[in-house]
Image: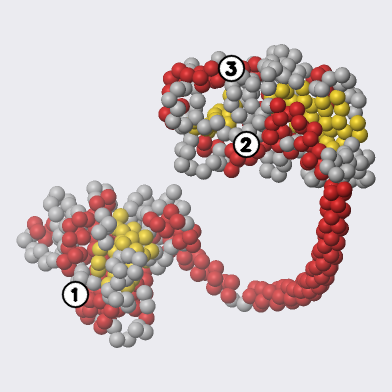
């Protein structure tokens, strides 16, 4: 079989072979004690005639799906290194989490299994910590002076052992060495080893026996995968394969030898009459004729009877509880059926009422009115861009009039807004853009008329400076930076419209903060104010959006882009969501927006400006 990869074991099979001390010779007594204690059932024992070893014991434990049948064979070895073989067959696949290794179940840990060549324990940890001499480890990891698998792991020893590593330890106890190595030992050992045999940092490596490396490489498990039970299962399977297929090493056993050791007759002597819990024939005890053992057994039987009676009572109570639960479920089902019936009747009645209402609507004028309103809305959107173009032509005409007035010596309009270079190439004021007088706006529009003079600027930074000075009811956040709107071919129009919007916001804030009549229709919101007074500034109420779409409000990315700092007097958190905004331009690549927060009825009695610049991220812009 040398050089041929072994077939994988069935998931229900367990094989192990190893070496142990002279305590292995007393395995029969240990099994009798476990049998007497009820830990397992000793079925038979056998040996070859004329020899003390090898000996074989066949046992079982568990019931139902947890039943396991196993065989243990012990054979003489050189010195005090005696060999053992274990084969176990379970009714269900072996699990790292809920089954103990058969090596441990059969009491072999008392025989202190160890590697016959490396001298390290196969039952306890062999810590490689703060060692002065590490030369012997070179023989273990590189020169093949070992016969069993060994798991070496390097980690921060201040941390607790991972739970899956402990389960690996339980599943392979007696088959595989466990060597934790600190950083100093790992560094010094790695300096003596070739790269392919070195101990990895912050990882676990299963060093398989040298005679096994032709079949598979050493598995390596990084620390960040220590929590994966499936990875440890692979390591356990590798240990079991290397332990059960001994074509090399000190124990050389082939499949035929396994068959002979485990299943061939060996003058077996029956120990129990029934492996499934019937009448048992116990081995004779070495004490006073077995009387004490019999008394103990009778006491245990009485205890078992009491336990069985308690289990029966518990089962009866559980049955009563389940019957009551089933009756409650049946009542809920009946109530649910009644509810479904009533709901079906209600749905039928509502559908009839809906059909009647739809018939009435079709006979009335409401659908026609709704279609007319919808057509008007579409027509308004259709002419929005034409309105912007007309405003641009009006601005150009005003500049030309101003240039003609300057040429003919006409006086300049005081306080006019300079929206950009004129046809003559110089900045010009626009007296016709000055707005209307107090009388044109009426009583509520006094603040609008008072601020109708625009500053002569051609950059948005200058526009903000002018607003700080002239519009006291507005507060600009420190993050407001409209510089991205400069240098565009429509920057002049944006400057003019932005100033008019800011004037209206300032007028609205002062009017609303000082109004005695809070029921005034034009003070119910900025959109209402613009609908009443925006014509004086050329601002349409269709440019005002009092909020954002539900998608923007509920999407963190879009909502965060519209959340800006505010004074704690406005919001204790120091931030607020600026949903309301003004469309400086309805569409286009930049589509400037001015986002504001209305606190005119709050403690600041102001309108807070959070953003003036290109359109913020939204489903449409993205």
Evaluate whether residue 365 shows in this view: yes
- Tell me the mark number nearer the camera, choosing from 3 and 2: 3
Q: Can residue 401 be seen in this view?
A: no
Q: Residue 145 carries which label?
A: 3
State which mark lies toward you, 3 or 1.
3
Horizontally, residue 402 falls left or right of residue 215, namely: left
Residue 78 placed where, x, y %?
Answer: 70, 17
Mark 3 crowd level (few <14, some 14–19, many ≥20, 10 Å Cα): many
Q: Which of marks 1 and 2 is in front?
A: 2
Alpha carbon of mark 3 to alpha carbon of mark 2: how far? 22 Å
Real-space Cα separation, disc 3 to disc 1, in angstroms? 100 Å
Q: Nearer the viewer, residue 230 or 118?
A: 118
Identify the secondary structure beneath mark 1.
Answer: helix
Gap in Å between the C-alphas at discs 1 and 2? Answer: 87 Å
- Which corner quadrant of the image does residue 173 belong to? top right
Q: Where on the picture, by quarter, is residue 501? A: bottom left
Placement of the N terminus among the 4 image quadrants: top right
Seen in the picture, residue 241 relative to 39 is either above or below; the reply is above
State left or right for residue 484 relative to residue 78: left
Determine whether, in the image, residue 101 is placed left or right of residue 291: left
Q: Mark 2 points at which residue?
A: 169
Q: Give the x, y percent position of residue 442.
A: 26, 81
**Residue for badge 1:** 450
Cβ atoms at labels 3 and 1 below 8 Å apart: no
Q: Which residue is drawn at 45% across and 56% down?
A: 556
10 Å neighbourhood of mark 2: few (<14), some, or many (≥20)?
Answer: many
* Among numbered discs 3 and 1, the one appearing first in the sequence: 3
Position in image of residue 211 (x %, y %): 65, 16
In this view, the residue in front, 476 or 575, is 575
């Amino acid at each position: 079989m040398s050089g041929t990869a072994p077939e994988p074991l069935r998931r229900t099979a367990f094989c192990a072979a190893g070496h142990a001390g002279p305590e292995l010779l007393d395995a029969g007594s240990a099994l009798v004690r476990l049998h007497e204690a009820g830990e397992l059932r000793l079925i038979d024992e056998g040996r070859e005639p004329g020899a003390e070893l090898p000996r074989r014991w066949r046992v079982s434990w568990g019931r139902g799906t947890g039943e396991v049948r196993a065989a243990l064979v012990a054979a003489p070895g050189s010195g005090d290194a005696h060999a053992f073989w274990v084969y176990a067959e379970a009714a269900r696949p072996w699990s790292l989490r809920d089954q103990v290794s058969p090596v441990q179940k059969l009491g072999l840990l008392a025989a202190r299994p160890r590697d016959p060549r490396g001298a390290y324990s196969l039952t306890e940890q062999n810590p490689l910590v703060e060692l002065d001499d590490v030369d012997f480890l070179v023989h273990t990891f590189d020169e093949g002076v070992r016969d069993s698998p060994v798991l070496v792991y390097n980690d921060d020893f201040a941390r607790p052992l991972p739970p899956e590593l402990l389960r690996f330890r339980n599943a392979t106890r007696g088959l595989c060495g466990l060597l934790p190595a600190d950083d100093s030992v790992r560094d010094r050992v790695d300096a003596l080893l070739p790269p392919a045999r070195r101990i990895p940092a912050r990882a676990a490596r299963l060093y398989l026996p040298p005679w096994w490396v032709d079949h598979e490489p050493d598995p390596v498990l990084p620390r960040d995968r220590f929590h994966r039970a499936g990875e440890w299962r692979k390591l356990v399977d590798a240990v079991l394969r290397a332990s059960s297929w001994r074509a090399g090493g000190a124990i050389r056993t082939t499949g035929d030898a396994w068959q002979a050791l485990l299943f061939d007759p060996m003058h077996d002597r029956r120990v129990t009459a029934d492996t499934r819990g019937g009448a048992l024939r116990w081995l004779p005890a070495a004490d006073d004729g077995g009387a004490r053992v019999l008394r103990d057994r009778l006491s245990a039987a009485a205890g078992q009877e009491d336990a069985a009676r308690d289990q029966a009572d518990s089962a009866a109570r559980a049955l009563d509880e389940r019957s009551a639960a089933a009756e409650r479920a049946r009542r809920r089902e009946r109530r649910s059926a009644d509810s479904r019936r009533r709901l079906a009747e209600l749905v039928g009645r509502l559908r009839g009422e809906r059909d009647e209402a739809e018939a009435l609507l079709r006979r009335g004028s409401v659908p026609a009115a709704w279609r007319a309103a919808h057509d008007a809305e579409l027509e308004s959107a259709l002419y929005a861009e034409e309105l912007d173009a007309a405003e641009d032509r009006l601005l150009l005409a005003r500049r030309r009039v101003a240039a003609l007035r300057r040429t003919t010596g006409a006086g300049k309009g005081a306080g006019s807004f300079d929206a950009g270079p004129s046809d003559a190439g110089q900045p010009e004021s626009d007296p016709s853009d000055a707005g209307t007088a107090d009388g044109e706006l009426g009583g509520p529009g006094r603040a609008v008329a008072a601020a109708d003079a625009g500053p002569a600027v051609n950059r948005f930074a200058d526009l903000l400076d002018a607003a700080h000075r002239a519009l006291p009811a507005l507060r600009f956040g420190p993050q407001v930076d409209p510089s991205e709107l400069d240098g565009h071919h429509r920057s002049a129009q944006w400057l003019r419209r932005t100033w008019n919007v800011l004037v209206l916001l300032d007028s609205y804030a002062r009017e609303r903060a000082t109004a005695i009549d809070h029921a005034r229709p034009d003070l119910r919101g900025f959109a209402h104010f613009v609908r009443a007074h925006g014509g004086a500034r050329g601002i349409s109420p269709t440019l005002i959006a009092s909020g954002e779409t539900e998608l923007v409000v509920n999407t963190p990315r879009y909502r965060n882009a519209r959340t800006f700092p505010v004074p704690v007097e406005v919001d204790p958190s120091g931030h607020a969501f600026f949903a309301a905004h003004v469309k400086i331009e309805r569409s286009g690549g930049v589509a400037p927006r001015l986002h504001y927060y209305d606190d005119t009825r709050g403690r600041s009695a102001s309108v807070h400006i959070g953003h003036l610049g290109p359109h913020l991220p939204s489903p449409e812009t993205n």
